[in-house]
Amino acid sequence: MRWENFFDDLEGQLASEWEAERAALDTEAERLRLSRVALRERLSMLVDRERDAVPPSFDLADGTVLAAEVTGVGADWVALDGGRSGALVVPFASIASIGMPHADVLRSARPAPARSALADRLSLGFLARDLVRRRIGVTVHLTHGRILAGTIDRAGADHLDIALHEPGTPRRASEVTGHRIVPFAAVAWIRLDAGATLA
């Protein structure tokens, strides 16, 4: 009778140690998975979040704080719906921090669905060239605080050319007050003119 209790006790200890070891391995596997998650993946998990919750808050390099919903994610930028502010584009390098409800923090850390190869090639340069093609007016907010309003004329591999003119007016040679070449590294965020979308 005592031997049965002894063996039951040993069996319980082994099962407990096995569960503890498996839990430790699961925890380590999760840490390893999270170590490979990129900001792009976490932001893409916010695209279809519940809209009735508090929107994420983006602290940017120029000191701006934007409360906005994530509507799309490119290779190195995120598209935001700023409500009355309209469509916004923020390079990842310009994001200082993102505030959101704890449920969204946890959801964004889940494994993301596979992305298309095309989405991974949609860089800020690609987006800027699309804005050139569509002649959409923009306001470019620079990391040091200056604001440039106008139309992007050209976009290179790591910079854009902007013709400066009054916001909300079409680009006409007679309305252009100057030109600037802006490295992408200096862009904190871009606001598209009212009514313009990234779709």
Image: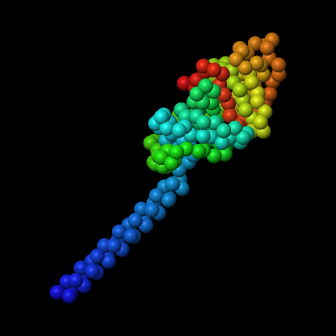
Query: Which of these two is toward me, 45 or 105?
Result: 105
User: In what quadrant of the picture does the N terminus appear?
Assistant: bottom left
Q: Quadrant of residue 186?
A: top right
Q: Nearer the viewer, residue 86 or 132?
A: 86
Q: Name the residue rendered at 81%, 24% in the picture.
A: 179
Residue at far bottom of view: 2
Looking at the picture, does residue 35 appear above or below residue 49?
A: below
State which quadrant residue 189 falls in.
top right
Q: Residue furthest toward the right?
A: 178
Picture coordinates of residue 72, whole percent (x, y): 54, 33
Q: Is residue 31 above or below residue 153?
A: below
Residue 100: percent from left, percent from top = 55, 44
- Residues 161 and 176: in front is 176
Colour setup of the view: rainbow
Q: Quadrant of the C terminus?
A: top right
Q: Is residue 101 left or right of residue 146?
A: left
Name the spot of residue 93 as percent of width and height, x first.
67, 43
Q: Is residue 117 visible?
A: no
- The x, y position of residue 171, in whole percent, is 73, 15
Tell me if 140 is positioned left or right of 31 in this view: right
Marks counted in the figure total: 0
Residue 148 placement, left or right of 117: right
Residue at 46% in and 58% down? 30
